[in-house]
Structures are given as C-alpha cells and as structure tokens.
Image: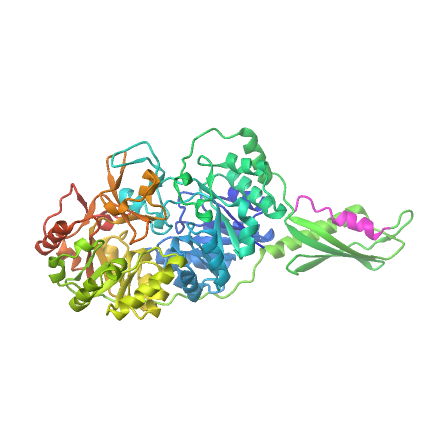
Amino acid sequence: MLELLAPAGSMDALRAAVQNGANAVYLGCGTFNARQSAKNFTTQTLTEAVKYCHIRGVKVHLTLNTLVSDRESKELIDLIRHAAFCGVDAFIVQDLGVVELCRQIAPHVALHGSTQMTIHNLDGVRLCAAMGMSRVVLSRELSREEIRYICANSPIEIEVFGHGALCMCYSGQCYMSAMIGGRSGNRGRCAQPCRQSYGYAHWEDKYPLSLKDNCLIHYLQELTDMGVASLKLEGRMKKPEYVATVTATYRKALDEGVVTKGMEQALMTAFNRQGFTDGYYTGNVDKKMFGVRKETKDDPAWIKAARQSYETGESALVNISFQARVTPAGSRLTVTDPEGRSCSVEGPTPEVARNVELTGQAIADRVSKTGGTPYRCVEVKTHVEPGLTLSAAAINAMRRDVLNQLTAIRARHDSKPLGRPQKLKDYLGSGGMPGLTVQVTTREQITNQLMALETAMLYVPVHILLADPKLTRQLVRRGKVAAVLPRIVHDDELTRLRLGLNDLYTQGVRDVLVGNLGLLIAARQAGFTIHGDFGLNIYNSRSLSVCHDLELASACLSFEMTMPQIRDLSKAVPSEIIVYGRLPLMVVEHCLIRNRTGQCTCHLGNLKLTDKTGAEFPIIKDGDSCRSVLLNGKKLYWLDRQEDLSKLGLWAVRLCLTTENAQETDKVIADFIQGTPMDPGNCTRGLYLRGLD
C-alpha cells in the first residue's frame, strides 16, 4: 500500500492530517528541521503528538534535516534521545554527521534520507542504504521513468513528493537565501528568494524562478505499481485547513482510484500558484511549469468545512474486533486491534431473564457503537448462554472500559536501550599556510600562467578533459589534476560518465572532485582518489569523520560556515575552503535561457538575472549539460587575508574561476600572489565573517 505522508507544522495541522486519513506525518521539533518558521513542536508536545498518532495507527517521522554545527551537537543528541524515547518511527536526515549520531544513539529508529541530501540516482540510493538508511526521499526533479528504474533496483524504500511547493534549485544545493540574506535553506531558514521578481540583464516584473506547486494526484496508481513506498505531501508552513483538504483529497483518490473535478477544485481552493504542474514527473520541463501565488481571501465555507474535519469528533481509523462472553458465572468483553494486542474487562454477573433474554446480536449492536473514538468495529464474536440478561448500561460501560484500556496500550511503546555517541578523535589539521587549489570552468581559463602555478590540485571539469586529450596529457604531466564531476548526474547520464571516467583513468588522471553522494560509487569503481566538494555540505566535525570513513582524500567545507567554526573543526580528512570566486547559489534542472528565449544559448556567456535592487546573478551551464547554475554577482574574496587563512588548519584554499576570461584569470592569480586588497564594490567576504542569522 502506498503510504500517505502528510505535513504537520503544528498540533492543529497534525490533527488535520490524522483525522483526514494520513498513514504517517512528518514534523519538526525545535531548530533542527528545514522549516524553522513553522510552529513546530517542543519536546513536551512531541510526546503528546506521538501518543496521539500511535493511538490512531499513524506513524511519526521527525525531521532532523538541517546542517548542524559542532556547538549544537549536545542539543541535537538530547533531541535524538528524547524522540527515540517518545517512540518516533523515523528520523529524516540530511547532515552526514546527524546520520551517524542517529545510528549510534537510536539504531532501532528508521533513518530516511531527506530530499536535502540531493539523492537523484540509484547509486545515491545504494550508498544511503549502505549508511544504514531504510528509505530515501528522491529529488523532485526526477521523471516517472527515472523513479520507476530506481524503485525496480533499490534495496530500500523510495519516497516521492506528490503535492506541494517546488524549490527551483535541487534541494540541499541552494545557497541563495544564505548568501544574499544570511538565512540558510540548509539550516531551515530559507527566505524564498526564488519567489521574487527578476529580469534578464535588467529587472522586470517577471518570476523566472517561481515554480507552480507539484500535483501528482492523477498518477497515484502508477506510483503504486512502480513500487513507491510513500507519497509525501508538502506543507509544514501552510495552515491546518490546507493540510486537512489536501490530505483528505489524496486519501479519497487513493481509496477510490478516481480523481473528480471536485477533488481538483478542492486542491485549487486550498492553495495554488496559477495552477499546478507535473512537469518533472512527465518530463515536460519548460516554462509552463512557472507561476506565482495570487493572494485572495479564503473561502469561508471551505475554512469551515476543513476545520470541522478535525475539530469535531473522531474519524474511525483503527479496525478492531470484539469477543463477548456471558454466562451465569459472569460477563467478559475482549477487544483486539490490528497488531494483535488484546485487553479484557470483567462485567457484572448477569441476572435470570424474566421477560426478554439477552442475545448475541443485542450485545453486538451495543459494543459496535464506537462513535467518538478512533475505532471501527469490524467483527463481534459472542457466546451468550440462554436465559440471561444484562443491562444496556452495563454493556456500554464494558465497551468504554475496554476501549480505554486499548487506548492506553496503543499509546505505550516498548522502550529500547539507547546508545552513546562515539567520541570523536581530535584532528588538528594542517599547520601553517594552506596549499592552493584552483578550479576552472572553461578551457580558456587554463592559461600558461595557471599551468606554471604551483598548486595542491587543479580542478578541471570532466567534459573539458574528455574533449581535449592533448590538454589532458599536458595536465597529467604537470601533475595534481582532478576531474570535476557535475553535481547532478541522473541515471541515464551515469553510463556515459562511467565510460568517460574509464577513459580519463587510462590517460593518467587519478583524482576526481565529487559534490554528490550518488557519484562516489562510480568514481571508486573506476579507481579514482576522491575529493569531496562543497555540494556534500560538510558543516561539522562528525561529517568530516564520515568523510574519513568514506575514504575521501579531502573535503571542501561548507561556505556557510564562519572562520571560527572552520578553525575549531576536528579535521579527520584534509580540508579546504573556497576563498575566491562567484559562489554557486543554485543548480536547476531548467535551462534558464531556453525558458526565456525558446532556445539554449547559455554557451555564449554574459547571461544573468537581475533583481529589483539591481543585483546581478550570472548564469552558467552545469558542466556540459543544459542545466543552469546561478552564481552570486559579487565575488567571494579572501586573497588579502592569507595570514588569517593560515590559522584555520586547512590543507588548501581554493580559487574558483567561473565567468573569468584568460586575462582575468591571470589577474586573479597575480592578486593571490600579491595579496591585493579587496574591492568592496565588487567583492564580499561572504559568510565566513558575518555568519548566518
């Protein structure tokens, strides 16, 4: 059966989800979740929420899907322990360090890889399985064919987003809100800059980054048939009435197998952005997927009906069976739930019937009246000896008592022993001035001056190396060259990449830079030494420890960290940070230029989005694909602060070249050598100094 997983941003929303047919809910507690602006739950209300759900046969998945700093680890450990003690059914995780903590503290609680992990191919799923996860939430950009392929070959469960808001960027890879406003999506505080207006070259009142909400209600049977385990409804930031309507509509569609115009209209009424889209699922990735929210007053009739669904009464959610026995020696009523748990109550001794004797049917009629409770009576077995009678009040009291007992039993869970997190070794990292790494984006940037520069590593996109064997041989002779793999590689692209990696290996390339878990297997099988890129979102010491376990040769730390945080990390693997360049803010499945003009001309360069403040965001291609990468307009600049960089224990600092031409590349190198002061008009210190809000 396809699990219907509904959002619960508050206790009211949780009740709305449960009373309208959710099989499971997902919710956040405290600050370690990707929707910190939702009401969320406290440790006390989390306990209440789990009991409420478990009584009604609904599972609870706790979102721990943000990056966590070292200083926050104690608070996180306490939350994991409390949640496991409460009986949550699963943790939804992003941070590799959080994955390890959950496994060490509460190995009996299921681990689900969040969509924030950017898992979008089968190898990524397999790696998550090897790390102890029992489910992965796939990236929302996958088509039905890609989902079907992954489900058919996955060793663990697959969860798919079925309805709700679509981020423009691949989840987990968006740094736009953090860089322009200090509110990190990876830390649960996204300010949604994708919903703002932008123009191409100059500002226009257009919305090229605002996608319509996803809606897969017409494909539920198809998703079930392909083996999807869970259908997730987005909406922890939305009101309980929205949760009630969307959950009820999808529940009805799943149960009845049809979608009516009325159901479609209910979804539109609850929330829409100029309609809905199924573009990713159907493979129609185009500008028809875009829309904005038009604010209108909520329909009072809709609000009233939605609230009534969860504020008044109880939906019968749990099937139960009764066994009643009435003999001259006494009366007894037993109830059994779907999990086989039973409890019984003893009733009064029956009297001898003077007029009408008690029958099994009469008892069945009484005990099956379970209205106002979460229970639905599906069977009553009776044994009533003749000539006896028992009052209706006595039978009703037995029913109430036995159901109260059952509720108490269902609210309890078996406490399992919790572990202690392993203490991390303290790795001081490298001493003194870090080495220099340089990452190029174009062939033009590989200048003679760059070739002559002493570097700890030169990162070159894999498609450039494959297209120019002569250059590749030169770089191999020069030494210390790594192929940069795209962050996004779907399964239908992975075969070609594997062949390319084998080709490069025969040419002498031995290192690769990888920014997604889904590429580690292919790179390792091809024999390469693997360096972790910023896309892995390494934010704490425990994540670096996991990188060590994954046998990474180095790791690029998150550029959302501060200098003190970087300095204080236990560096289990050699670590580097980016100190120069236009930082990548988004990687998107769309070609932003084709969406504008109808044809792709992103190879021509000099393309950008402009917001209403005049800030510019250059657009480049993601490798040789037609996916777009949106860059920050201002360049990160630390070339004049090398003494500060020497105190961080880093293996290397990286110059990231994106839109620079050959002459600008040589100037960047010269500026690094000379320690040229920063131009505050064109450059920024990034988040290394100011940190996140």
Camera sees residue 693: no
Quarter of the image with the N terminus is bottom right
Q: Is residue 470 left or right of residue 592?
A: left
Q: Is residue 127 left or right of residue 371?
A: left
Name the one closer to the observer, 437 or 451.
Answer: 451
Task: Give me the residue at 77% from left, 47% from top.
Answer: 366
- Is 360 magenta? The answer is yes
Residue 669 falls in image quadrant: bottom left
Residue 253 vertical position relative to residue 379 in the rendered view, above or below = above
Residue 60 in the figure: left or right of residue 481:
right
Specify start and end residues of the magenta stretch as a single range: 358-373
Q: Is residue 252 magenta?
A: no
The quarter holding residue 117 reads bottom left
Say if 346 sits above or below 677 in the image: below
Residue 428: % across, % down: 23, 66
Query: Whole-percent x and y of residue 420?
Result: 41, 66
Q: Is residue 36 left or right of residue 506?
A: right
**What residue is shown at x 57% (from left), y 30% (from top)?**
301
